[in-house]
Image (cartoon, grey):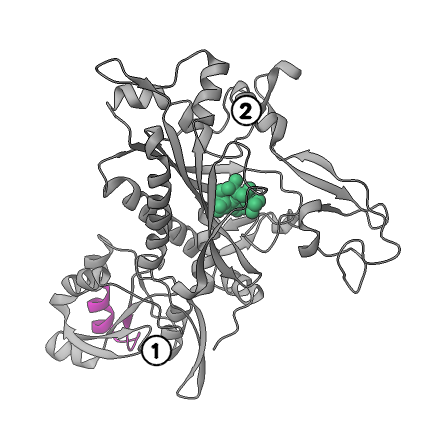
Amino acid sequence: MTDVTMDKIVSLCRRRGFVFPSSEIYGGLGSTYDYGHYGVLMKNNIRALWLQSMIQERDDMVALDSAVILNPAVWEASGHVAGFSDPLVDCRTCKLRFRADKLDDAQCGKKPSKKPGEYSECDLTEARQFNLMFQTQVGAMEDASSTAYLRPETAQGIFINFKNVMQLARRKPPFGIAQTGKSFRNEITPGNFLFRVREFEQMEMEYFVPPGEAERWYEYWIEQRLQWYLDLGVRRSQLRVREHGAEERSHYSSATSDIEYLYPIGWQELEGVANRGDFDLTQHTKHSGTKLEWVGQEGERYTPHVIEPAVSIERIFVAMLVDGYDEEVVADRDRTVLRLHPEVAPIKAAILPLIPRNDDMVAKSRDLLQRLRRRWMVEYDDGGQIGRRYRRQDEIGTPWAFTIDDQTLEDDTVTVRDRDSLAQERLSLADVPAWLDEALQRPWHSPKP
Ligand code: ATP
């Protein structure tokens, strides 16, 4: 079985232009990344699949896109100004900073690296709370009154729009509001590639329910979200649900479960599902003076409870790359292949003229390209040996390749090669769009053990 390390993932992402270290020509900016072509396409697919399952395929959900910079009072009310912090320790010797609750995962600045505190010279300070919100100034004045924050989560933008949505979208609990967008956290120790970064794209959904139904919907959303990963072909053996103990939960949450993935760094939170109770709506009611509650036609009223599935595209992106990464030897040659779900794969199909110098093959290939690209992200490649072109597509996870060869010129058929099985079959050129359409709808499971 292929040993999938984070280094292999990072190196593939760089080599094939999925992800680059940011600001590289200026020496980088620790743990900040830019997405290249295939990375953008894959990210877009993940977001679109999430929105499809959350909004398009349901009738109890609406979309929202709230601002990144909100009135700072929002973060007072939510408790972030007072409490969105991690415990920080400094080492007076090596001048590095660590999260006090993650010392076991940290590495000391001395070589060979050990855990902070394990060398006799280590001199750690007492832990103090470090607020993770990025501050900025709004407007031209630079005083306390202009201090604002980059949102550390998208959820609060949803809570403060509860009344707008309920009234204007005429919703009655249970209903949900879903949004995706950038969040910012000044993490003390970002790292492990995209797993922990300071700027990431969250996908959060707040599901408002009658108080008596919260427990049931909490269980429901854990199931739904787990199933979403399974439907996208992520291996069941690499996923687990872990319920938080009381000491780990936020004070307002009556229950939280993490959907964990077995990353190369061990089991880690991929997505969190929390029962947030009525904490958020109650807090914003208190601080804003606007009643955020449900009022029925007979005048019955209550503050809905909230179930929240929250995840970042980054953590899904890494999990899917790790789950898909494979190396094998085929006909005495090594190949690296990303066994991604076809819906997640950046490119759905490659179109390859067998002999790039043959004008007729090129013309037929270009014609097929034009027909397919209106509906799907496909790629034409006429650079180099066919074997090398197949391997390039394998490495970026393209599920199928259509090859235009001598026989195409005679009978208008092409071969289609399957990324996973390497099986080749022949089909009529005219049938390719219908074939691809059908192939993309077939259930897909990882062939990896
Ligand atoms: P952790 O304990 O790992 O710091 P958290 O419990 O603070 O995470 P939440 O506040 O529950 O995380 O955030 C919801 C989701 O947002 C997480 O499940 C994860 O998918 C994602 N996320 C949080 N922080 C980061 C980050 N720094 N980089 C990438 N994704 C993140």
- Which SS class for mark 2? helix
Q: Which mark is residue 75?
A: 2
Residue at 51 percent of width and 26 percent of height: 69
Residue 353 lies in magenta, yes or no? yes
3D distance between C-alphas at marks 2 and 1? 56 Å
Classify residue 286 as left or right of residue 348. Answer: right
Asked which quadrant contains residue 373, the reply is bottom left
Q: Residue furthest top?
A: 289
Residue 192: % across, % down: 59, 56
Residue at 28 percent of width and 45 percent of height: 52
**Quadrant location of the C terminus?**
bottom left
Q: How many marks?
A: 2
Confirm whether residue 152 shows in the render: yes
- Which SS class for mark 1? helix
Disc 1 target residue: 386
Q: Residue furthest bottom?
A: 332
Q: Choose between 363 and 292: the one closer to the eye.
A: 292
Q: Choose between 6 and 107: the one closer to the eye.
A: 107
What amino acid type is highlighted by mark number 2?
Answer: Trp
Is 338 above or below relative to 93? Answer: below
**Labels 2 and 1: the sequence-earlier one:** 2
Residue 14 lies in magenta, yes or no? no
What amino acid type is highlighted by mark number 1?
Answer: Ile
Confirm whether residue 197 shows in the render: no
Residue 383: % across, % down: 38, 71
Residue at 57 percent of width and 20 percent of height: 138
Neighbour class for label 2 at 10 Å: few (<14), some, many (≥20)? many
Residue 132: % across, % down: 62, 35
Residue 317: % across, % down: 45, 54
Q: Which residues are magenta?
A: 351-366
Q: Choose between 436 and 104: the one closer to the eye.
A: 104
Is 171 above or below relative to 245? Answer: above
